[in-house]
Image (cartoon, rainbow, N blue to C red):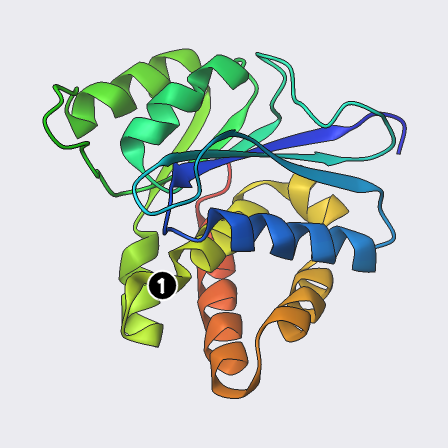
Amino acid sequence: MKSRFNLILVGVGGQGLITLGRLIGEACIRAGLNVTVAEVHGMSQRGGSVVVHVRIGEGDSPVIPLGGAHHIIAMEVLEAGRSARYANRETVMVVNDLLLPPPLAKHPGKKEVIDALKSKLERVYIYDAEGVSKKIMGTPISSNIALLGFSLGANPVLESLISRVAVEKALEAIFKEKALDLNKKVFEEAFREGRSNIGG
């Protein structure tokens, strides 16, 4: 590929951002793509803000420039708002329908953040990833997998780089037995929902 595809993953520690970055990196390798995955900000312990930069294609810098993201996956609404500095009008953003307010801090409401994002970006999807994970897994633990599935379904450019087959192979490299089967189901259901929402 001639230019790099820039993907930002944001959330808080404990939501599986590092696992998601690893999964996407594994899928890219299996698709024969050059990829860099870098956690460049925040702390991965539970509750800390986490930003992971994924750059697909040839190049040296692991860091995505401000305004340079093609796609953003946000595990939480406030972190989605913070990530807007990496977005431009054409950026596709998929946001988990979840607000995790920091303790003892004033913060904007969910609607306020989402309205601000939609005023800046043409394509913002709010998705109940936790709901899908709870339905299939019994817990929200696979919300990250659901957001990746929805993202591939909603963004054909991303899917053209990382195919569903490559993601399934990556899931097989990370998960085993029952966890693998359930995560595949989460991914596939979320992909179908993303595809049904495409362009909207």
Can you give x and y, in whole percent of width and height, for residue 32 in the image? 87, 53
Can you give x and y, in whole percent of width and height, for residue 64 in the image? 65, 21
Q: Is residue 54 left or right of residue 141?
A: right
Q: Secondary structure at mark 1?
A: helix
Q: Is residue 184 left or right of residue 80?
A: right
Q: Which residue is mark 1?
A: 141
Q: Amino acid at mark 1?
A: Ile
Give the answer, above or below, for where 185 lies relative to 193: below
Quadrant in which the C terminus appears: top left
Quadrant in which the N terminus appears: top right
| Residue at the spot 67% in from the left edge and 48% down from the top edge | 159
Q: Is residue 122 left or right of residue 106?
A: right
| Residue at the spot 74% in from the left edge and 38% down from the top edge | 36
Give the answer, above or below, for where 149 lies relative to 161: below
- Answer yes or no: is residue 195 visible: no
| Residue at the spot 27% in from the left edge and 43% down from the top edge | 97
What is the quadrant of residue 125 in the picture?
top left
